Image (cartoon, helix red, strand yellow):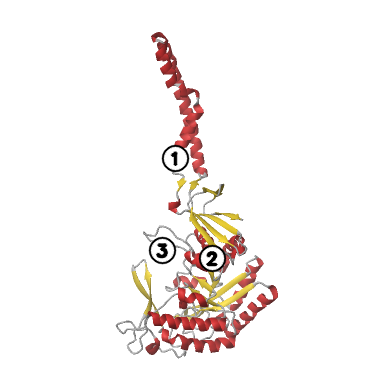
Amino acid sequence: YLEALGMTTTTKVVATIPMMVDMPLTTFEDLATMYDRLAEKGVDNVNFKLTGFGKGGLYAYAPSTLKFESVVGGNSGYQDMVAYCNEISSQTGKQLAIYPDFDFVNIARLGGFDSFSPLDDAVRTIDDRYASKRYYDATYQSFLYDFSTMVSPSVFMTLFEKFSKKMDKLGFSGVAVSTLGAELNSDFDSDDPYNREDSKRLTVDVLKALSDKYGKVMVDGGNAFALPYVSHILNMSLDSSKYTLSSAAVPFMGMVLHGYVSYAGTPTGMASDIHREILKIIENGAAPFFTVAYQNTSVLKDDFDYNHYYSIDFEISFDEIVEQYTRLNEALADLQTARITGHEFLDGIRQLNDNEKAEVAAMMADGRENFEQAVADARKAYNNRKALAERHGEEFTEVFEETYSYLDTPDHYAEHILEEYEASLNREISAKSSFLVMVEYTRQDGSKKVFILNYAAYDASVTYEGTVYDIPVGGFAVIDR
């Protein structure tokens, strides 16, 4: 999956006068260019989520205002891209689809002549105020507003009907309605209230209408009520919260959905540890997912609402996308219809790294040198005491020789040093640590493919079904049977 950012609005100074300028981040022509370059490298199964291509860009109007921004190519550019997707799929057999994203739950910008009235159609709080979407900020340790208006669920179907009339004329290969799969809001309007069960029912109605009309629907999160109506889920949780009381993560969603629905976690290219992210993708059976923009990415760093987008420049990300896609495709390509049938935490042995091996060798050398000096000193004492023992009787001589018998096996002493040092490294890896994970896939023909994943910060050896597997940091072993 590739999420392409379309357009943002930035401030530009012209003749000392600040002016608001629509700045394209990715155009429809750029989408074709990106796909062609990726296909040349073998990355030819691509689904584009188009974020910020509609009216208002990243600060979008209501979905009923269905018009693609002129700076990204306008409606004609969209239609050309749909035709290009159909051509790729029909003539080459490769997979290319675009999913323009529309937000039915939150509206960032009002007044788009979309017949959406915030006075009548916005969510009300229990004290009769208009509701705005909030998100938790760890820096401030409180909830902050993003200044978007929350839409009453009673309006969803009206927005859909107006939206679909325009979309039907433009053509489509799919549609993305991210927030419908992730958010569920009540509306405490005193004249027309809706609780969360009401909101769920109305959300399911519009999801079903979208599925019936467009066939392929893409959402975020993937709450249970959305699953029967969606083909693609992005930003699905692949890991635990990692809070204090969270001891380990189990790929429950993957166990339920794999082989039935396509899904991905959060953007792979924006992960703090991409090696761990790749292992999580394999453990959950997910697809790789990158957020990209083709041009003008620098303007986002000055935008408070969108400066969380980083490492998204396509030119910079290109090699990483190809590398990780190729790696995951080799591992998971033959498992798209398989089910996850096994998951287990394993015991293992930590392997010494090169520095530690050098340190062990040095200690053994030092130990042998010290041992040889000790042998020399002890032999001298031995000879002196042996001569003394001979003057005092046979019994004293036997006890003395037994005490000093280890002097004839210096290799044992060196091995003892190595054993003591290795033991001090705590090389045993317990299954309780959840660093080493086994996940098993079963294909439709009954054959299985097993992955052993190493989440630890060091190389490890794992014995699985009688065979020892040496797995590097952030790596995995594959057992096909």
Quarter of the image with the N terminus is: bottom right
Q: Which residue is mark 2?
A: 286
Q: Earlier in the sequence, mark 3 or mark 2?
A: 3
> Cβ–Cβ below 8 Å for labels 3 and 2?
no
Disc 2 to disc 1, how far (Cα)? 38 Å
Residue 330 picture location, percent across and down:
62, 60
Q: Which structural element holds mark 2?
A: loop
Q: Which residue is mark 3?
A: 241
Q: Earlier in the sequence, mark 2 or mark 1?
A: 2
Q: Residue at x 46, y 85 (%)?
A: 62
Q: Which structural element holds mark 3?
A: loop
Amino acid carrying label 2: it is: Ala
> Cβ–Cβ below 8 Å for labels 1 and 3?
no
Q: Which residue is mark 1?
A: 423
Q: Residue at x 42, y 18 (%)?
A: 400
Quarter of the image with the C terminus is: bottom right
The image quadrant of residue 83 is bottom right
Q: Residue at x 42, y 21 (%)?
A: 403
Residue at the left extreme of this rendering: 127
